[in-house]
């Protein structure tokens, strides 16, 4: 094998190592069904807004936080017996909203949207089911990166007493924020079964890269030295 062919193979190997170490990979999808907390403990949800407060950090251990448009506002985890005209998709709870002025939370907050869902680490896919219950309604999803740059949107209109799915995917795996808004005329609506796929990026350590390059350089140097010695003896 000539020095040139060995050098080519070594270059390919180093290049492959760089690519492999820098590859973005997706983990298994995670599901928030509002029936259990981040540790899998059952949630005994109330059936009225006045009995609860807005969802915020309950799922923070999963890297997910929720917030409404103003302090103390946002969606509430309620039991399906709360008379929204539709049952939960799984279990008995969903994330509920009510823009009526008389809908007040136990701490004086309001169960209103838009609802912001932030992710501690970027995700590649997001989906959630929405329903207007007794009324048809239109919903919009907006996805943003870590710099609040809009990546894209999804809009659906749901039929009476039916769920529809909002979703968005990014091949770059750079979704950091999702905002959900009911843009129809209905003031009461719910969401259920939020799914997201985290992204893990393996970044090569500087020491690892130096080691790879050093090993390659040493191999090339040794090869050239042996070729030179052989030529001198000849």
Image (cartoon, rainbow, N blue to C red):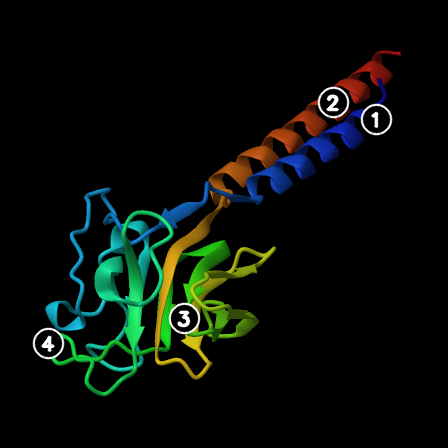
Report which residue position mark 3 lands on.
Answer: 132
Question: Which tag is nearer the camera, tag 1 or tag 4?
Answer: 4
Q: Tell me whether circle 2 and circle 3 mark residues in contact (CB < 8 Å).
A: no
Label 1, residues with CA under 10 Å away: few <14, some 14-19, many ≥20 = few
What is the CA distance from the residue labelled 3 to the residue labelled 1? 67 Å
What is the CA distance from the residue labelled 2 to the residue labelled 1? 12 Å
Dot 3: what SS?
A: loop
Taking the image as drawn, is residue 52 in sight?
Answer: yes
Classify the position of the C terminus by image quarter: top right
Q: Tell me whether circle 1 and circle 4 mark residues in contact (CB < 8 Å).
A: no
Query: Which badge, 2 or 1, comes first in the chain's sequence?
Result: 1
What is the CA distance from the residue labelled 1 to the residue labelled 4? 73 Å
Question: Is residue 47 placed above or below 137 in the rendered structure?
Answer: above
In x, y percent, where is residue 73?
Answer: 24, 77
Question: Which tag is nearer the camera, tag 2 or tag 4?
Answer: 4
| Label total for image | 4
Question: Is residue 212 placed above or below 132 in the rendered structure?
Answer: above
202 and 31: which one is in front? 31
Q: Tell me whether circle 4 and circle 3 mark residues in contact (CB < 8 Å).
A: no
Report which residue position mark 4 lands on.
Answer: 107
Classify the position of the N terminus by image quarter: top right
Report which residue position mark 1 lands on.
Answer: 5
Residue at x-position 15% and y-position 61%:
46
Report which residue position mark 2 lands on.
Answer: 223
Label 2, residues with CA under 10 Å away: few <14, some 14-19, many ≥20 = some
Dot 4: what SS?
A: loop
Residue at x-position 46% and y-position 62%:
162
């Amino acid at each position: 094998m000539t020095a040139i062919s060995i050098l080519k193979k070594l270059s390919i190997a180093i290049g492959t190592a760089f690519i492999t170490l820098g590859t973005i990979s997706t983990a298994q999808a995670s599901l928030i069904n509002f029936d259990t907390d981040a540790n899998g403990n059952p949630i005994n949800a109330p059936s009225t807004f006045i009995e609860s407060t807005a969802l915020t950090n309950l799922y923070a251990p999963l890297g997910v936080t929720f917030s409404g448009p103003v302090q103390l506002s946002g969606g509430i985890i309620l039991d399906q017996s709360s008379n929204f005209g539709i049952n939960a998709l799984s279990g008995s709870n969903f994330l509920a909203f009510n823009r009526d002025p008389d809908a007040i939370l136990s701490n004086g907050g309001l169960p209103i949207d838009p609802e912001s869902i932030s992710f501690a680490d970027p995700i590649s896919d997001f989906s959630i089911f929405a329903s207007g219950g007794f009324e048809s309604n239109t919903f919009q999803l907006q996805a943003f990166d870590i710099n609040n740059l809009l990546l894209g949107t999804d809009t659906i209109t749901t039929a009476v007493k039916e769920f529809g799915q909002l979703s968005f995917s990014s091949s770059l795996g750079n979704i950091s924020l999702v905002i959900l808004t009911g843009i129809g005329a209905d003031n009461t609506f719910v969401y259920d079964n939020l799914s997201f796929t985290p992204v893990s990026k393996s970044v090569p350590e500087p020491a690892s890269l130096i080691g790879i390059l050093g090993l390659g350089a040493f191999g090339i140097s040794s090869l050239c030295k042996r070729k030179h010695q052989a030529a001198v003896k000849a």
